[in-house]
Image (spheres, rainbow, N blue to C red):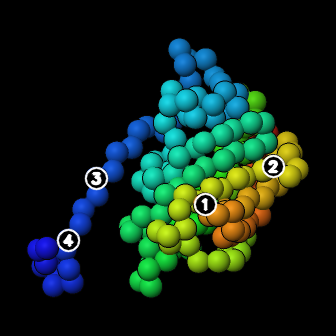
Amino acid sequence: MAEGKSGWGEERSRTVRSDDPTTATFDGEPMSGLDQARAMLNGDLPVAPIAQLLGMRMSDVSPGSATFTLEPHQSHENGVGVVNGGVLATLLDMAVALAVMSTLPAGHRFTSIDLSVSMLRAAGADSGTLTCVGTVVKPGRQVSFTEAKVTDSKGRLIATATSSLLIISPAGPADAGRTQ
């Protein structure tokens, strides 16, 4: 085993590929959020580059719900050998975002307003596949409210989140065009 320049063990590298996430139409026709999410699930459209970077995979989507999986990897770990909380927060955020996306008509977009995460148990390589299910609790024309849960391969609860997401109509933010 060759030691790296730092003397801290074998150096490792990882190659990451990502696609253009703005490809949200087929033949120029706008797609509903559910159709976009299903196209991502089927591999016909790319998932967000951050999901590709971290190795998240969408495994299911239905109106108001999205499921992602993640195989914990050494590159996800913090300095004490457990999956970094930011990685788990990103997994939770991805699931709630696609859950909201699955409820939107063509041309609508969204962005996170807030994300409140509770870490309940450490996750690591021995946790097996992490599964995150995001659900829309209350859809809205301007704001949607969501929740998500991450479990390990044994069904143990790892982390939970609640989030609200701003809905952006094709004309712009929710208050575009209003007069004072």
Q: Residue at x 55, y 68 (%)?
A: 127
Q: Residue at x 79, y 42 (%)?
A: 64
Above or below, comparing residue 96 to residue 73 in the picture? above
Q: Amino acid at mark 4?
A: Glu
Mark carried by residue 69: none
Q: Which residue is mark 3?
A: 15
- Mark 2 secondary-structure assignment: strand
Q: Amino acid at mark 2?
A: Val
Q: Amino acid at mark 3?
A: Thr
Side (left or right) of 115 relative to 43: right
Using the image as rendered, state which of residue 122 and residue 153 is in the foreground.
Answer: 153
Sequence-wise first label, 1 or 3: 3
Q: Are marks 4 and 3 in contact (CB under 8 Å)?
A: no
Q: Residue furthest front?
A: 154
Q: Which residue is mark 2?
A: 136
- Mark 4 secondary-structure assignment: loop
> In the figure, residue 54 lies in which quadrant?
bottom left
Q: Are marks 1 and 4 in contact (CB under 8 Å)?
A: no
Side (left or right) of 108 relative to 42: right
- Camera sees residue 170: no
> In the figure, residue 170 lies in which quadrant?
top right
Q: CA distance from mark 1 to mark 3?
A: 26 Å
Q: Residue at x 41, y 83 (%)?
A: 79
Q: Which residue is mark 1?
A: 153
